Amino acid sequence: MTRLESMIRRLRAQRDCLNLAVSLMEEIPGPVFELGLGNGRTFDHIRTLLPERKILVFDKKSTLGLKPRPVAENLIIGDVRKTLPEHLAEQSQRAVLIHNDLGNGTEEEGVEMCEWLSPLVEQSAAPGCVVVTNSALQLNGWRQITIPEPHAWNRYFIYQKPHSA
Ligand SMILES: C[S@@+](CC[C@H](N)C(=O)[O-])C[C@H]1O[C@@H](n2cnc3c(N)ncnc32)[C@H](O)[C@@H]1O
């Protein structure tokens, strides 16, 4: 497979995982957390699927000139390891959809991210919350959902927190 084909496959899997995740949580009220604004591609996709939803976006940098971009009060700039716990301490509302697209998706980075991000995701999630993530997470008692693109089984992961938790 060429690098171009691999990238097309990865982006298609990302889109299909987000579409599936939204179908699982769209009836549950609450905000979305987007971890990693980057070029804003997935932010744009999520806001199109969930136009009425508050989407809080976390990134260590604010990409200038990005269109569309989150409104200022919904864009939280800084290292998410610091900004997300600060946000959770200030706001009681928990997320019903979390999309993690931090980092570069390499295996080494994924192992490290799993360690620090899994507890943060658990603290961020409301009952029934769905997480789409580019690295595997350890979420106690959550259900892992089969992703729609079988070729991307080790690149994207979907989990759902029990509704009664
Ligand atoms: C792959 S890009 C996100 C791509 C984006 N979802 C899109 O569709 O265009 C990863 C982003 O994560 C951000 N990032 C990586 N580590 C971070 C951290 N510890 N805290 C906050 N942002 C981080 C980077 O600045 C970068 O913008």
Image: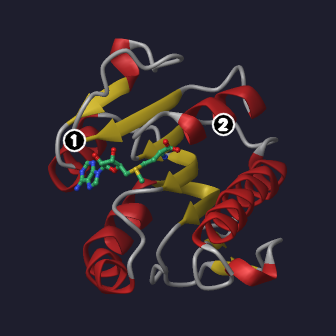
Q: Is residue 14 left or right of residue 134?
A: right
Is residue 53 shown above or below 80? above
Residue at (27% x, 39% y) in the render: 87
Q: Is residue 20 left or right of residue 87?
A: right
- The number of numbered discs placed on residues in the rendered structure image is 2
| Residue 46: mark | 2
Q: Is residue 152 visible?
A: yes
Is residue 132 shown above or below 80? below
Please provide percent x and percent y for residue 16. Answer: 78, 57
* Amino acid type, label 1: Lys
| Residue 76: mark | none
**Label 1 vs label 2: CA separation?**
20 Å
Is residue 70 shown above or below 158? above
Give the SS element for disc 2: helix
Around disc 1, counting alpha carbons within 10 Å, would you say few (fewer than 14), some (14 to 19), or many (20 or more)? Answer: some
Residue highlighted by disc 1: 60
